Image (cartoon, helix red, strand yellow):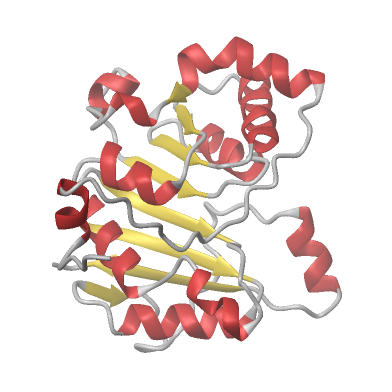
Amino acid sequence: MKSFNSEEEARAAGVYISKVKSFVKREGRLTNAQARAIENNWPSMGLSIEQGLLNLDEVFGRKAPTVLEIGFGMGKSLVEMAAAAPENNFIGIEVHRPGVGACLADAEEAGVSNLRVFEHDAVEVLAQCIADESLSRLQLYFPDPWHKKRHHKRRIVQPDFVQNLRNKLAIGGTFHMATDWEPYAEHMMAVMTQADGFENTSDQGDLGYVERPEYRPITKFEVRGQKLGHGVWDIIFKRVS
């Protein structure tokens, strides 16, 4: 098979190069409430990769700082953040349809109007739909740690991924990660301290973690883990160039 110098060169030649996924799509079963929430709210809150590069001022009908969360799970904390900060725009990305349905159901119940969601791969959404320097904060909370060493290549926090999302952040914007798996926290920290254009916001030095900011809600899962003595590590790096 012919080799190519870049993915762009391969694409131009009509050759598809498969990528390592950072997730396994477990579809699950939609509840009736989740299905209804998608049907009722997708026209106003759903975003599609087919829309291409978004004009966020048009998407939200206003100019405001935009926060994007990758992998929002069932969406409870994302909806809570959107409700608590109506001055900000929020975009959530999730590949699992039941989570999207649950998020939209909670958003409808909370009456939030500053939230939009994608049901798609975050890497592709960032590349195709999010303009450079358009985000004030990127959030990645409790991603799959891929515990086994042979699966570490699947971890989403990798040097190439970090540089891609760096371009999406405005100067001064932040990348906020949280994990309850200490080896993954160490991996995140190692990647971020080597990443060009970022600076750790911790007052504990270059390798320091931060206290959970008030804007990140604490989940029931997190509370349960803390009672069992499990730790949670928050890491926030700021784009400086």
Q: Position of residue 221 (x, y in %)?
A: 78, 59
Q: Is residue 63 visible?
A: no
Relative to 140, 7 lies left or right: left
Q: Nearer the viewer, residue 4 or 33?
A: 4
Q: Residue at x 38, y 32 (%)?
A: 87
Residue ranking furthest to the front: 1
Location of residue 194 by image quarter: bottom left
Location of residue 241 by image quarter: bottom left
Q: Residue at x 17, y 49 (%)?
A: 13
Q: Position of residue 63 (x, y in %)?
A: 24, 28
Residue 133 versus residue 223 in the image, above or below: above
Q: Residue at x 44, y 26 (%)?
A: 114
Q: Position of residue 48 (x, y in %)?
A: 40, 27
Relative to 18, 65 lies left or right: left
Quarter of the picture holding the N terminus: bottom left
Q: Position of residue 205 (x, y in %)?
A: 36, 89
Q: How many marks?
A: 0
Residue 6 versus residue 186 in the image, above or below: above
Relative to 50, 2 lies left or right: left
Q: Residue at x 81, y 80 (%)?
A: 229
Relative to 230, 9 lies left or right: left
Residue 45 versus residue 10 in the image, above or below: above
Residue 166 versus residue 127 in the image, above or below: below
Q: Is residue 152 visible?
A: yes
